[in-house]
Amino acid sequence: MTVRRRWSPTGLALAVPTALFVLGPLGFLVWMGLAQERADFLERAQDLDLPMVVGQVALLATLTTVWAGALGVPLAWLTVRTDLPARRLLHWLAPLPLAIPPYIGALVYQILLAPGGVLPNFLGVTSLPLNLYGVGGAAWILGLFTYPYLYLLVSGALERTNPALEEAARGAGLSPRRVLTRVTLPLLRPSLLAGGLVVFLYSWADFGVVSLLRVRTLTTIIYDYIQGTADWALPSALSILLTAITILVLLLQLRVLGRAGYTQIVGAVKPAPLVSLGAWRWPAFAYVGGMVTLTLLLPLGVLGYQASRLSASDMGAFALTQWPYLVNSLWTAVAGASLALLIALGVARSEGRGRAWRVSGLLQVGYAIPGTVLGLGLAGFLHATLPWIYATPLALIVAYVVLYITPAFQAVKAALAQLHPSIEEAARSLGRGPLAAFHAVTLPLIKPGLVAGWLLVFVLSMRELAATLIVRPPGFDTLPVRIWTHAMDVGPEPRAAALALALVLTIALPWFALLSRRLRGISPSM
Amino acid sequence: MELLTLDRVTKRYDPDQPPAVDALTLTVEQGEILALLGPSGCGKTTTLRLIAGFEVPDSGRVVIRGATMAGPEGWIPPEARGVGIIFQDYALFPHLTVAENVGFGLHHFGRSARQERTRQILALVGLESFALRYPHELSGGQQQRVALARALAPAPALILLDEPFSNLDADLRAQMREEVERILRNTGTTGIFVTHDQEEAFTLADRVGVLNEGRLEQLDAPETIYHHPATLFVAEFVGAADFLPGLVTPYGIVTELGVFANTEAWKIGEKVKVMLRPDDVTFVPSSVGDGMIIRRDFRGPETLYCIRLPSGQRVHSSQASSSLYPNGTRVRAEAHLIHVVTFPV
């Protein structure tokens, strides 16, 4: 509403501290990084073999993106636009692997393929001729468990494609195959790019998978440094390098997407007619079914099998000792999701419509910061400025809010955008004040969007590993931290599998709820 | 009695742009129905929003029932103005039933009083049996009625309608127009509606205000607007019109289609434009006629002919469709003006 163009005190009270917690950690890192003497840094970079490491991460991210694209894009087209058998069920199953964090995926394939694992034992050999521990293995796993990001965006775009455009191309004399290459695929460009970017940046900034598979990347180097030494300068400098490249890639995306308008303005879109696969129907089904097996059934089965090797009495005692960590995870994730949503709602409302400069843009910077970097920056920033938050569970909640305020904000924004301003104005003209109108009309109408946003942040916080490892107070472990520590210290043994299964099942429930709400168009976060 | 007064109300959205509403002054009487007519972007919707309280005027004063709603003394928010609105998209609350929508503005009533009033208003718009439906289960016309009922329920002094019929099919539009007028008249409610459809403005309103670029060009009864447009803009925007060049002489205004009375006392020797409505122009086919039919638009009951005069000037003539003449027919055109309306060249 035009009346409320100015920032409300509530909006400012929410936005300013959040902006502080986004910018503070980055500022701290820049400050610490600059303290590093240049000559000294170059020498140590030499020792670390930094160009090789950066090249290796870039290779990993590229391989993962290509692999995820090869998995996700055909799947999206098959389930949305063809007469694939059971396409509705598969369309619903395809995003589910997101409930399995990639580091758990790494654990699964360790259990399965590592020397002494399930498959070598089954085959009666000590080790398999393929090596999981390396860039190839990491890319395999990251691709398997991040392809749903691409799938969600591309299938959403395919569903929204106006079939009249394709019919117009047919009318202009193009064959179906040419229509696919000349119209359908080019129209998917923004979603392909956006999805590819999410996967690229995820693997670029990943910590969990690469640390478990012993791949040396910037994140693992930073983490090892923090653990081993009290030296902040070098990890800060590396963090800035990591973030700078991330931001560069994001800016590149803006440039690529800059000019062409891809919004297809249409009234009611009728669904496009399905492409008949003919003889390819069942091979395609086998391919899709194989993917679902590889990314969903196999991991759950392997985790269940491995966990079941723990004897019942051991399991009881183990559950008792690990119970507090689940509680830690739950309440910090609930607090983080609630806080993120409240802030997002406050900021979105205050910004109103059609303002040029937006605080939300600033808040979204948190989305671009890799978890390891944010963990380091936040720990240092809190230590320096707010010691009473540092090393308390509150710091974890702050980290979740900073990392995931963007998906929360997008959910709120999307919900509010569905609402025509005249709805609230109608309530005002019928004698309700601004707050009463919001409560009586706006809130009930955006509630589904708010619930979806909350669930998304909750799931993402529940599975967060990299920042949590650094920011958590000593002794305050979360479930991901326990899983990771077990897997790192002891290996992929039954206890780690049991914990991983517990985490996956805890995440899966809200994730089911989220998907059945047909949450589309909210780009998933890292 | 004056119900609403706008006194030199100005609203500017962008300092670099001309104002959306520019020193607008008008008064609306109790029980009157006023139409604000103008092309898109003329400021009519902004005017409505200024009255409702969704926009704050930069200067000027909005007075409803003698109380200043916006002005130098302060500003009253929309919820305290007692002004009902019907939005172009109806803005029905999708999560509430028809009865809950209608009862929405009655929150200060007791439960039974609210139910009684809701029932009464739904009866007025003929939707008693739809009380428990949700808005999306209704047709466009029914939704419109719910919007009307919801706005009427708190018995507002004034109802504002923003392009109320633009989302309806043509035949439904005429029917709803009649119905809305009947209900406003029966309840004695003052109404202001904005439209770009002159037919709608003419049939529904007691007075029509024509807006152009934020300024009120003319505010008059529909027939005055049509027959005596105050400005060239009004003449062109309201109804079709041709403008015939003329020269003022002692005998009257001499034009290609004859001499007309100099009713506006132009000075001798001045050049003017005489407004011709299509129904002012008649013609007879004649082999020696100097006009020629160059275009024919068949419109059912009437047919619109475009006639080229020897000078190249074109005039339009609307004729009953009982006899039709093909293109190229030579004709003798005549103009019979009851009201001579002229503008400076």
Image (cartoon, coloured by chain):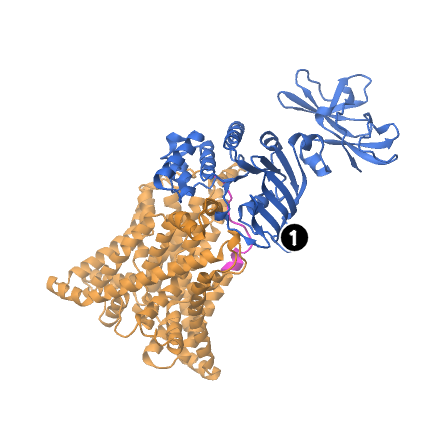
The chain painted orange is: A
- Report whether residue A294 is seen: no
Q: Which residue is mark 1?
A: B17
To which quarter of the image does residue B41 belong? top right
Q: Quick one: A119 or A207, which is closer to the camera? A: A207
Q: Is residue B292 left or right of residue A359?
A: right
Q: Secondary structure at mark 1?
A: loop
The hue used for chain B is blue
Decide whether residue A300 is among the magenta residues. Answer: no
- Report whether residue B122 is seen: yes
| Disc 1: CA contacts within 10 A as few (<14), some (14-19) or many (>=20) | few
Coordinates of residue A26 in the picture (x, y in percent): 44, 72
Coordinates of residue B341 in the picture (x, y in percent): 76, 31
Q: Quick one: B54 or A349, which is closer to the camera? A: B54
Considering only vertical position in the picture, is A150 above or below B337? Answer: below
Q: Is residue B66 left or right of residue B312?
A: left
Coordinates of residue B186 in the picture (x, y in percent): 50, 30
Considering only vertical position in the picture, is A512 above or below A172? Answer: below
To which quarter of the image does residue A97 belong? bottom left
